[in-house]
Amino acid sequence: MADTGPLFVSSGDLIADRRYKWALDQAARGDFGGAADVLLQTVELAPRFATAWFALGAIRDRLGDRSGAIAAFERARDADSQDYHGARLHLARLGAGDATPAMSETYVRRLFDQYAARYDTALTERLAYRGPVLLREAIEKTMQTAQRQLHFGSMLDLGCGTGLGGAAFRAVVDRLVGVDLSPAMVAQAAAKDLYNRLITADLMSVLSDGTADAEKFDLVIAADVFVYVSNLAPIMAGVTRVLSAGGLFAFTVETHSDDGVKLLPTLRYAHGEPYVRRVLAEVGLAPASIAKAAVRSEKGVPVDSLVVVAQPSTAVQLPASSHA
């Protein structure tokens, strides 16, 4: 899910606020040149108005003014240490600054809070999202290979969102815990009455400071979560701290044909398979299966993805497989 554009955040200057709204009205009518002119007047009145700088960057980008867009996004970044609108991501997309910046908690929370009410419909109907279903299938195959029953005493759903993952696994899990950064998404999940416990927090706090009461989980899943994480090593190391000795960790990533991490035009991260395997090994996890799949579509085109099931390296290992 890409950013849907700037929201209104007051500059504290009534005239600047009115000009900002006027500029957005002009842009909505297709007058992008006029909107850019008004936004320039706006930031002259309120030089620290990050939202107006971000809107100016987006409009200049649309007009093909790359250098002007970069300059505006840099001013938005410098005026907002929390990176509310994701200016750093747009700078990376345009080839300026850090190529794979971490997404700020403020940006991700805002993105999903505004999307929560229409999230399920958008993913399943418009984007053909299949993440939880593919994870369930991959885990079933892993358990069959190990001649184990498809049943787990406890499961941690990282980035649980509105509960699509919980719905896919509720029937085979005794205790289900979900965690998500967005209060609005957690509220949607709570309404489905699937989880024994829901936690509103960033994932690393749950994995590192005992927010989950130092509980060990037999299954940890992360469906369509790591597309918002550039460096997977810290969060995967955190998973090893909460995963039981014989537990499974299943997740999806969008991927590309090379190694390393890439920021896609959708402002989502893609992780190469060699990178995924390397990070798993570094944190003491081994792949039970890595399968290529299309977890979702983007503008009707399937998005290259990986569906991964991993286990602690010290566990009795299943033969790793990689297949299309």
Image (tube, grey):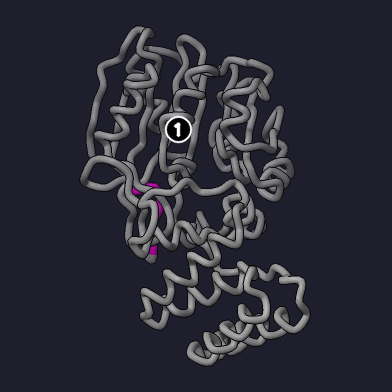
Quick check: can you spot residue 119?
no
Q: Amino acid at mark 1?
A: Arg
Along the line of sight, the residue nearer the viewer: 34 or 139 = 34
Q: Residue at x 66, y 37 (%)?
A: 201
Q: Residue 281's quadrant in the figure? A: top left
Look at 65% across and 59% down and name the residue there: 114
| Residue 71, above or below 256 | below
Q: Residue at x 56, y 83 (%)?
A: 40
Using the image as rendered, state which of residue 211 and residue 153 is in the foreground: 211
* Helix, strand or loop for disc 1: helix
Q: Quadrant of the C terminus?
A: top left
Q: Position of residue 163 (x, y in %)?
A: 61, 41
Residue under pointer 1: 136
Q: Is residue 282 visible?
A: yes
To which quarter of the image does residue 52 belong?
Answer: bottom right
Residue 247 in percent (x, y) is at 47, 16
Q: Which residues are magenta?
A: 294-298
Residue 21: quadrant of the picture: bottom right
**Closer to us: 230 or 29:** 230
Q: Give the percent coordinates (x, y) of residue 131.
A: 45, 43
Is the magenta region chiefly helix, strand or loop?
strand
- In the rendered view, tell whether residue 75 sits above or below residue 46: above
